[in-house]
Image: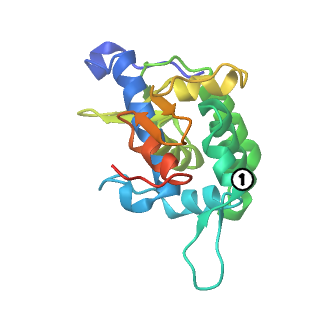
Amino acid sequence: PREPLPFSVTGRLPTLVELENYALDQWECFLLQLINSSQVEKGTTFSSSMMKTFQRGLLSSRDGEAAKLSENGFQFLLMETNAQLWYIMREYISSAEERGVDPTDLISFLLELSFHTQGAAYSLSTLTEVQRVAIMDLMELGLVKLQQGRKDSWFIPTKLATNLSSSLSDSAASKEGIVVVETNFRLYAYSASKLHCEILRLFSRVEY
């Protein structure tokens, strides 16, 4: 991996806890976009190229109807975070040539990124044009956080990025919640996550 920038250049960087919260928020916004785009707050719109890549195989639509979550899309939502991440990366890489990008360059960069130090700052000026475009898409997913200094700009890998090199069983942390189902099939959910609520709406009627 490339050398991180010294503290004298970057000043205070986000803590690992702040980075993890940022990554989970970005990832949750991304998944919310799939289920119900009206639930996504302003400032979290994703690049059209990334969304088209993501929707392939997860959304289905009939003539004149809005796209809906397919069976594969529903299964995707119930995967662990790391498995979801690799699904997205696989789609992202497989569509690289359509965007005029060499898949080999993209795979090399993703693997390199996974061996960077979580929470360290790396200069954007060391990236090629292909890598700069990829970093912007990866930021939307919460794999990196971008920051601007007086003279330099840098990216900071999050836990999602460093997890690219770990096995699928080493799942990233997710927001906790509790679901209680009674024998009459009445369901109670305790969660602060908008994503959890939207997933529940897919197979339940919300009364309160």
| Residue situated in front as seen by the camera: 80 or 201 | 201
| Residue situated in front as seen by the camera: 173 or 101 | 173
Q: Look at the image and tell me whether residue 139 can be seen.
A: no
Q: What kind of colouring is applied to the model shown?
A: rainbow
In the image: residue 165, left or right of residue 11 = right
Q: Where residue 138 sits: x, y (%)?
A: 52, 42
The residue under the point 34% across, 22% down is 18
Q: Secondary structure at mark 1?
A: helix
Q: Where residue 62 sits: x, y (%)?
A: 66, 79
Asked if residue 165 is positioned above or below residue 27 in the image, the reply reads above
Please identify the quarter of the rendering in which residue 165 is found. top right
Which residue of the protein is positioned furthest toward the bottom in this rendering? 64
Which residue of the protein is positioned furthest toward the top in this rendering? 7
Q: State the quadrant of the N terminus.
A: top right
Asked if residue 119 is positioned above or below residue 136 in the image, the reply reads above
Which residue of the protein is positioned furthest toward the front in this rendering? 184
Amino acid of disc 1 = Asn
Which residue of the protein is positioned furthest toward the left in this rendering? 150
Q: Look at the image and tell me whether residue 207 can be seen.
A: yes
Q: Where residue 99 sits: x, y (%)?
A: 65, 62
Q: Where residue 63 sits: x, y (%)?
A: 64, 84
Circle 1 residues within 10 Å: few <14, some 14–19, many ≥20: few
**Residue occupied by mark 1:** 72
The residue under the point 37% across, 15% down is 6
